[in-house]
Amino acid sequence: MLSTKLSHHALSANLTGLAACIVRDSLLDIQTAQTSINIAAQQGIPLACYLVRSNTLSSQQLLTCCAKHFDLPIFDLKNYDLTWLNESPINDELIHRHRIIPLNKNQYALYVGLSDPTDHTAISAISFHTGLHVQPMLVDEAELDKILSIYSLSTRLGPQLESTLAKITPIEEKSSPYEMTEQDDGPVSEFIDKLIHDAIDKKVSDIHIEPFNNYCRIRFRHDGLLYEAAVIPPHLAMRIITKLKIMSGLNIAERRLPQDGRLQLQHKSKTDVRINTCPTLFGEKIVLRILDASKIKLDIDVLGFTDIQKKLFISKLNKPQGLILVTGPTGSGKTITLYSALHYLNQIEKNISSVEDPIEIEFSGINQVNINPRIGLDFSAVLRTFLRQDPDIIMVGEIRDRETAAIAMQAAQTGHLVLSTLHTNNAIDTIIRLQSIGISIYNIIHSISLIIAQRLVRKLCKHCKQPDKSTPHDTHLLGYLVYQAMGCEYCRKGYRGRVGIFELIPMTEKIATLLLSKATTTQISDLIQNEKWMLLREAGLEKAKQGQTSYEELIRVIGLNN
C-alpha cells in the first residue's frame, strides 16, 4: 500500500498526489505547481515528465521526494535490460501512454517502474490489461525517458495530430454522425492530411481505423506488424471516416456494403492511397493502403535472392516463353518481385502488357490495364485481348480461377513470357492448387518455367543486434554465430526494414516425369531436396547465419520445425 502524509497547506490549494508532495517539500510553490499541472495536461504528458523536461525540477529531486513520502523500493534503470521490453506483457501503447516500464514478473505479480507512484490510473490500467497484481517501484524520470525514447513507438501519433483531434467538435446525441459542418471540415481534413503524411514519413504501409463500442482504435502496419497508434472517441472516428469517404469518391450514405476508393496526395512525391470500407458491428472499418512508389526499389539485387537464386531467376526471365509463378500469402512481397522483374524486362524492343487489380505502380513503357468486373472487364477478358495485341511479355496480377489459369498457360505455351501470382505456401502446394481448379498435369509441366515461393522477414538492426547464446537453435545453425533483437534509437524492437526469403523451383525433366507418374507430395519434396534446390526453411536459416535476421523472426514468419 502507498502511504503519505500531505500538508493542510497543499490540500487547501486543491493539490493532490505528486504535486502535493512537491509543494510540501517546498520544491515548488502552489502557483507554480498548479501551472505545471495545467501545462502538462495541455501537452498530454504526465506531471513528472513535464517537470523534468522543462527543467522545473531535476529527476533526482523528484526521486528523492517520492522516496521520502512513499514506502517503495527504488530500481536503478542504468542496469535495465532492454530485452524485457520485447517480452513485456504490457503492450506498447500502454507503456508510452502511462510512462510505465516492466521490470520483472512472476506467476502472480508484475513489477513495474514509474516516476509518479500517485498515478493510480496507470497502475489500474496495467493491472486490468495484464490480469496481474501490479507492484510499483520508483525509477528516475530522466532514465525512464531515455529508455522510452530508445524503445520509441515509431508509429505513435505525435502531439500535432493529438492537438488537431482536439479541434474536432463532439456531436450531439440526436444528430447524424455523418453530417459534416464547415466548422468540422477544416480540422478533420487537417487531421487526415497529417495522419497520412505522418504514416508516409514513418514508412507505414497500412492505416487501420477500427470502430468499437466505446472507442475507435487507429493502428499502423510497419514492417509487416500492426501497432496501436492511438485510441480516439467514436464520434471523432465517424467524422474522420465520413471525410475519407468524401475524399475518395465513395457513397457516404452506403454503410451496409463494402466500398473501394482511391485518393492521391502530394507528399515530397505523388502518393496513392487505396481505401477499403467494411461494415462491422459498431460501424465502418476503414483500411488505407499507402502506395508510395518513390520509396520502392525495383531492383532484383535488393530482393534478397542468393547468388544461385538470382542467376536462376534472370535466366528464366531471359527465356522467350514460359510461365513464372510467384506465390505466398498476402503481404509476402509478391507484387514487388513481379514489378522488379518487369523493371528488368522493360526494353523498347519488348511489348509488355499487364492486367492488375489494382495497378499499384505506374510503369512508363508498359501497357497497364486495371480490371473492372462490374462491366465485364475481368482478368480472363483482358488476357484474351492481350493475345490479339502482339505481346511479348504478359503480367497477370493474380490467377484466381480456372479460366484465367488456362489462358495464361496457353499464352506461355505459344511463345509468350507470362508472369503471375498465386496464393499458395510453396512450390508443391502451387501444383496441387492448379490441379484443384481443373488444370491438367500435362498443361502444368509444359507451361510452368519457374515457381517462386517467398516471405518477408524483418532485418536485425545493425546498431544494436547482439549474439544470441540463450535460445536453443536449429541443428543447422550449430557452429554459426546468430544474433537476437535488442532495441535502440535507430530501430523498433531491434528490427529495421525487411528482406525476402525465397524458394525457387524450376520445372526440370525429373520433376515433370515424377508429376506425370502421379507421385505423392512427399516423393516430389524428396526429389526437390535431392536436386539441391533451396527451400524456404533453408533460405531463412541462411539469413540467420548471415546475421540479417533472428531465429525468433523465422519462427514467427515460416514456423520452423526443430
Image: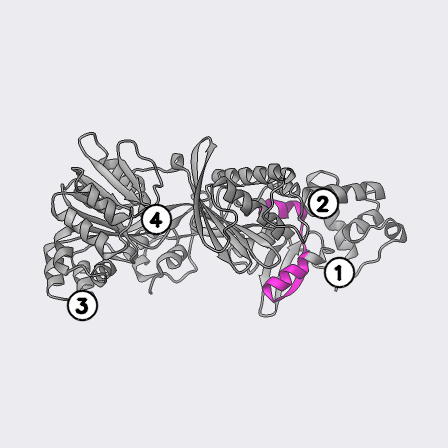
Q: Are circles 2 and 1 on residues that touch, CB within 8 Å? A: no
Give residue 41's mark: 2
Which one is in front, 193 or 306? 193
Q: Quadrant of residue 85?
A: bottom right
What residue is drawn where x is 72% and y is 50%?
63
Give residue 71's mark: 1
Q: CA distance from mark 4 to mark 3?
A: 41 Å
Q: Quadrant of residue 337?
A: top left
Q: In this view of the protein, can residue 81 be seen by the observer? A: no
Name the spot of residue 476 as percent of width and height, x first: 30, 59
Q: CA distance from mark 3 to mark 1?
A: 69 Å
Name the spot of residue 147 as percent of width and height, x first: 58, 47
Indicate the amino acid at tag 3.
Thr
The overriding secondary structure of the stretch rendered in magenta is: helix
Q: In this view of the protein, can residue 272 be seen by the observer? A: yes
Q: Which residue is mark 4?
A: 374
Q: Earlier in the sequence, mark 2 or mark 3?
A: 2
What residue is drawn where x is 57% and y is 58%?
212
Disc 4 versus disc 3: nearer the observer: 4
Give residue 519's mark: none
Disc 4 versus disc 1: nearer the observer: 4
Disc 2 versus disc 1: nearer the observer: 2
Name the spot of residue 441 as percent of width and height, x first: 14, 60
Q: Earlier in the sequence, mark 2 or mark 1?
A: 2
Q: CA distance from mark 2 to mark 3?
A: 66 Å
Question: Magenta span covers which residues?
Answer: 122-148
Give residue 520's mark: 3
